[in-house]
Image (cartoon, helix red, strand yellow):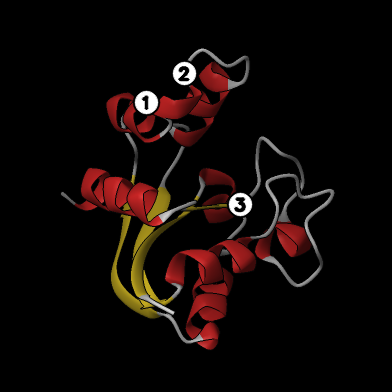
Amino acid sequence: MAHEDTFVMVKPDGVRRRLVGEVLSRFEAKGLDLHRLEMVLPDRATATAHYAEHEGKPFYDGLIDFIASGPVVVMHWSGESAVTVARALVGATDPAVALPGTIRGDFGLEVGENIVHGSDSPASAARELGLWFG
């Protein structure tokens, strides 16, 4: 196993529903180390850079509108296999099929508002950490 850094974001729906503490506690309980946490209101430029790989897809404009619709909490976590561990905690993108015990499985309501984002690879984590934390 490799020590990794990863990026996690509580999306506007998770902040609105007051699930930030729940998300934090699950990552801490798993044993990952929190290095940085900020609550920010994303501007459109940051939102479009974050989701650049989805540009041109039918859901893209709605996704950008959603992420820029309210505050998000961005976090830098690390630990052994942190990317894989974080993705397992987050659960499947579609909350309807996310397993119980995952954040999306327990709290997500729909694909478009699924509480949390987690980097899908070490390369994505590096890019996203650089984007959100400079």
For the N terminus, the quadrant is: bottom left
Write the residue at 70% across / 52% down: 92
Closer to the observer: label 2 or label 3?
A: 2
Q: CA distance from mark 2 to mark 3?
A: 21 Å
Disc on res. 115: 3
CB under 8 Å between discs 1 and 2:
yes
CB under 8 Å between discs 1 and 3:
no
Disc on res. 55: 2
Disc on res. 27: none
In the image as oriented, which residue stretches furthest toward the left? Answer: 134
Looking at the picture, which amino acid does disc 1 mark?
Thr
Closer to the observer: label 1 or label 2?
A: 2
Q: Return the residue nearer the eye: 104 or 73.
A: 104
Looking at the picture, which amino acid does disc 3 mark?
Ile
Write the residue at 58% across / 54% down: 14
Lower sequence index among marks 1 and 3: 1
Q: CA distance from mark 1 to mark 2?
A: 8 Å
Which residue in the structure is indicated by mark 1?
Answer: 48
| SS type, badge 3 | loop
Lower sequence index among marks 1 and 2: 1
Q: Return the residue nearer the eye: 2 or 110.
A: 2
Closer to the observer: label 1 or label 3?
A: 1
Q: Position of residue 72 (x, y in %)?
A: 42, 49
